[in-house]
Image: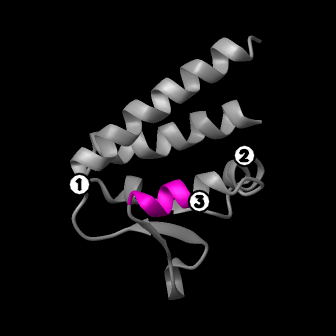
Amino acid sequence: DGGQALKLLLTFVRNVAQNPDEPKYKSISTESNAFKSKLMPLVGPLMLLKAVGFQRGEGEDEGKLKLSGEVDSALLADTVTKLTNAHAMYLQQNPL
């Protein structure tokens, strides 16, 4: 469901935008049930996460998306705004 994917993406991006120095928000498990069921079936979420700086982990970080190096705070803030607006529009067009 697109709404669930938007909500999860928003959570990932908002967490790292609000806590750029917190390592736990710079790593996303691609093996979690939530990631597998809500994001993996879709093409856009992985592309968006890569666009804001996440990369596939290697070695001991295999099975994770990692955000390393400097965080682009402006890009993350802009992405949070756009995801928030997209989620609101989705909910408006697809009432529960």
Residue 81's spot in the image, x, y percent?
Answer: 38, 31
Between 70 and 64, the residue placed more toward the observer is 70
The residue at 39%/41% (across/down) is 79
Q: Quadrant of residue 78?
A: top left
Helix, strand or loop at disc 2?
Answer: helix
| Magenta span of residues | 47-52
Q: In the image, is 12 to the left or to the right of 81?
A: right
Q: Name the residue under label 2.
A: 38
* Residue at the bottom extreme of this rendering: 59
Find out whether residue 51 is within the magenta segment.
Answer: yes
Whether 62 is drawn above or below 15: the answer is below
At label 1, which amino acid type do we have? Asp
> Is 62 drawn above or below residue 32 in the view shown?
below
What is the number of callouts on the image? 3
The residue tagged 1 is: 21
Earlier residue among tags 1 and 2: 1
| SS type, badge 1 | loop
